[in-house]
Image (cartoon, helix red, strand yellow):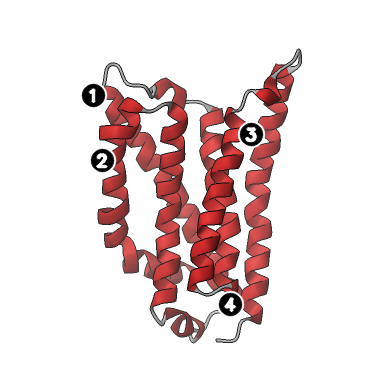
Amino acid sequence: MLLHLILKDLRAFHKFVLTMIILPGMAWCLVLIYPQFHTGSYIRFSAIATICMTAYLIFYERKEPNEALICSLPVTRSAIVSSRYWLALMLSVAGILIFWGTAFLAHLYYTNSVTRFEDLNNLQTLASVIFIISISLSIFLPSTYRFRLFGMIMSCILAVTNGLLLQYHLFESSSILDGPFSQDMKWLKFTTLTGLAIFSPLMSYQLAKFYFSKKDI
């Protein structure tokens, strides 16, 4: 039943996401972001586009009378919350692969771009993208069970802003790496933030289950 819920959501909005988010995002990366902006900008743009795929699904469900219908199915509320988080994970992985592939295509076409494909092929870059997506969705997803549409929009903006600011200061700012122990600090920072990116969705999931269990539908 959990798989059916995920597939239902994918069927409901895949055409819109493909035509309004993925394809325009890829075109924007190929024409503007990759050739004219540095690697950090490409990372942040890719993460935002990936987050938008999940956010659109949530807004779609709240706009249509789908929540009451879903709750009438023979599934627990915990399973409903789980399906949304599994779907977010699937979309996150898909988004990372799509925009990595877009960068590879741009790398084959451009000979003197500002973004360098080599900079995208390292563990820190992957951790940076995962961190933005994880923190942003960990803040946003519980709010979908707590607030109405306006509150969800505001929480989505707040979530993405926090994810981007934390990613910049913790991954790209050089101030924390100054001093004789900079290599040790890099490794400590990498492992700490990777752990945070894994731990945050788990706490977010528990919070979302709590809010949804108390919700009167």
**SS for tag 4?**
helix
Foreground mark, 3 or 1? 3
Amino acid type, callout 1: Tyr
Residue 16: in sight, yes or no?
A: yes
Q: Earlier in the sequence, mark 3 or mark 1?
A: 1
Distance (Cα) linking label 3 and label 2: 29 Å
User: Disc 2 residue type?
Assistant: Ala
Identify the image quadrant of residue 211: bottom right
Dots 1 and 4: beta carbons under 8 Å?
no
Distance from label 1 to label 2 (Cα)?
Answer: 13 Å
Q: Is 25 left, or right, of 58 in this rendering?
A: left
Which structural element holds mark 3?
A: helix
Position in image of residue 20 (x %, y %):
28, 55
Task: Give, as a three-letter code, the residue at label 3.
Answer: Leu
What residue would you read off at disc 4? 77
Q: Is residue 44 above or below residue 189?
A: below
Of mark 2 and mark 4, the one earlier in the sequence is 2
Whether residue 83 is visible? no
Quadrant in which the C terminus is drawn: bottom right
Q: Residue furthest right?
A: 180
Give the residue at mark 2.
Answer: 27
Q: Position of residue 2 (x, y in %)?
A: 50, 69
Q: CA distance from mark 3 to mark 4?
A: 36 Å
Badge 1 element: helix
Expressed as whole percent of the image width and height from the top left, the position of residue 199 reads 68, 50
Q: Earlier in the sequence, mark 3 or mark 4?
A: 4
What label does residue 95 carry, if any?
A: none
Q: Are marks 3 and 1 in contact (CB under 8 Å)?
A: no
